[in-house]
Image (cartoon, grey):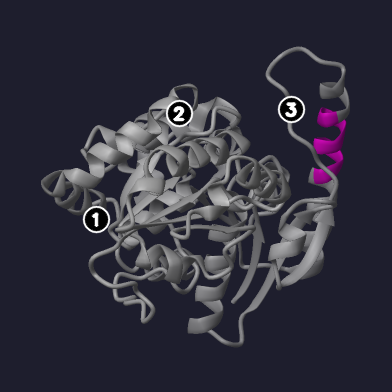
């Protein structure tokens, strides 16, 4: 099998594509997997498959002169994508969203190549919606996404394909003694200044007085030194059970240890929380397109699977956390509720559906 992957703009688009590629490679070791990346996108740091490159950028919703160049780049990217497809000769193109997905998947359709799409968020992105009519199958993470699609006969609910490590069977060997509750707080790979500041307030107002809690904060690389400075200024460095990292490389193990997770509401993060059945406080980023994270978080909140705190209400995080720590019954109900958002064997379901499409 020859598979051409595409997905760019954020790790939330790239990681599902990598997971799908790895699953195909695991099942069919002789498969040829390649990835169409943007010139300077994050996928260049994350993807180990053979890479091709196109130059493309997103189109802004409001009128802008920059859109003229964006449209021009999209047209040239379609042409370049056709060249890449003719060179690599894929059996199928798999797109996972982001502006770079459109030219590749559209070119594949025009050349008679099968197209599979995967949408991680509740609200489909612009690229996925534009490609809906051209796809042979559209994989979805949330059942709530169905209402936003016209071609419902193409939908296949499979959850989010996850890279290795996130599994309910994980039992951490270095779990602290049972008397201590572990709280993990992070704002993604780059971090979140507002979430970091809220975490310092929690340290000041709660963790300082509770030696039965271990609070782990991953600041993100761009915020680490600023947070360390604030910690010293506020004498939070004297709190031994408040632990700060720049970045957590083994997130699966650390999350498996956590009793409560405070995080953004990206689709991948939510899938990881569901896979490990974690109690969570979700703080949706207000800076993503179409408010995707808020809709993701609300889907969980409506089912009692998470507590949602908007960024402009982070002053209430300490009280929210204090209440959650004290409510054992609520935490148990949240664990059961979020487990329903986990789709077992998502990777294998996608792989088997791709096989059935190609057999047709």
Is 71 on the left-hand or right-hand side of 111? right
Circles 1, 2 touching at the beta carbon (< 8 Å): no
Rendered image: mark on residue 59 = 3
The quarter holding residue 33 reads: bottom right
Rendered image: mark on residue 32 = none
Is 289 on the left-hand or right-hand side of 241? right
Residue 242 showing in the rendered view:
yes
Which region of the structure is painted magenta? 70-77
Q: Which residue is denoted by mark 1 in the rendering? A: 339
Q: Residue at x 69, y 45 (%)?
A: 229
Say whether residue 71 is magenta: yes
- Is 170 drawn above or below residue 339 in the view shown? below
Q: Which residue is denoted by mark 2 in the rendering? A: 314
Report the number of numbered marks: 3
Q: Secondary structure at mark 2?
A: helix
Q: Secondary structure at mark 1?
A: helix
The quarter holding residue 153 reads: top left
- Which mark's residue is nearer the viewer, 3 or 1? 1
Say whether residue 80 is magenta: no
Between residue 13 and residue 227, name the one nearer to us.
Answer: 227
Residue 343, position as x, y percentages in the image: 30, 59
The quarter holding residue 131 reads: top right
């Amino acid at each position: 099998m020859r598979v051409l992957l595409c997905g760019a703009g954020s790790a939330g688009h790239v990681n599902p594509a990598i997971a799908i590629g790895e699953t195909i490679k695991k099942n069919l070791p002789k498969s040829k997997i390649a990835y169409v990346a943007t010139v300077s996108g994050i996928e260049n740091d994350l993807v180990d498959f053979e890479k091709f490159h196109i130059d493309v950028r997103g189109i802004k919703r409001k009128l802008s002169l920059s859109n003229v160049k964006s449209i021009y780049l999209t047209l040239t990217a379609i042409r370049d994508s056709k060249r890449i497809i003719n060179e690599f000769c894929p059996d199928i193109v798999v797109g996972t969203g982001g502006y770079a997905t459109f030219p590749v998947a559209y070119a594949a359709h025009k050349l008679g190549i099968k197209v599979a799409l995967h949408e991680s968020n509740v609200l489909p992105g612009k690229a996925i919606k534009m490609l809906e009519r051209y796809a042979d199958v559209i994989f979805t993470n949330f059942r709530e996404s169905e209402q936003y699609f016209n071609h419902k006969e193409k939908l296949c609910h499979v959850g989010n394909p996850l890279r290795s490590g996130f599994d309910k069977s994980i039992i951490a060997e270095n779990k602290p003694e049972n008397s201590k509750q572990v709280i993990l707080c992070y704002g993604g790979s780059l971090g979140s200044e507002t979430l970091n500041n809220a975490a310092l307030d929690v340290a000041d107002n709660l963790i300082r007085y509770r030696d039965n809690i271990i609070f782990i904060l991953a600041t993100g690389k761009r915020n680490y030194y600023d947070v360390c400075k604030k910690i010293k200024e506020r004498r939070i460095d004297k709190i031994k059970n408040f632990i700060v990292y720049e970045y957590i490389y083994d997130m699966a193990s650390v999350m498996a240890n956590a009793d409560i997770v405070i995080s953004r509401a990206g689709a991948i993060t939510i899938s990881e929380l569901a896979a490990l059945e974690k109690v969570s406080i979700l703080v949706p980023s207000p800076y993503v397109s179409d408010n995707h994270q808020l809709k993701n978080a609300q889907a969980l909140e409506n089912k009692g699977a998470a507590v949602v705190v908007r960024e402009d209400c982070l002053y209430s995080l300490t009280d929210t956390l204090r209440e959650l720590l004290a409510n054992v019954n609520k935490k148990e109900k949240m664990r059961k509720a979020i487990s329903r958002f986990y789709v077992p064997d998502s990777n294998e379901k996608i792989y088997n559906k791709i096989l059935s499409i190609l057999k047709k």
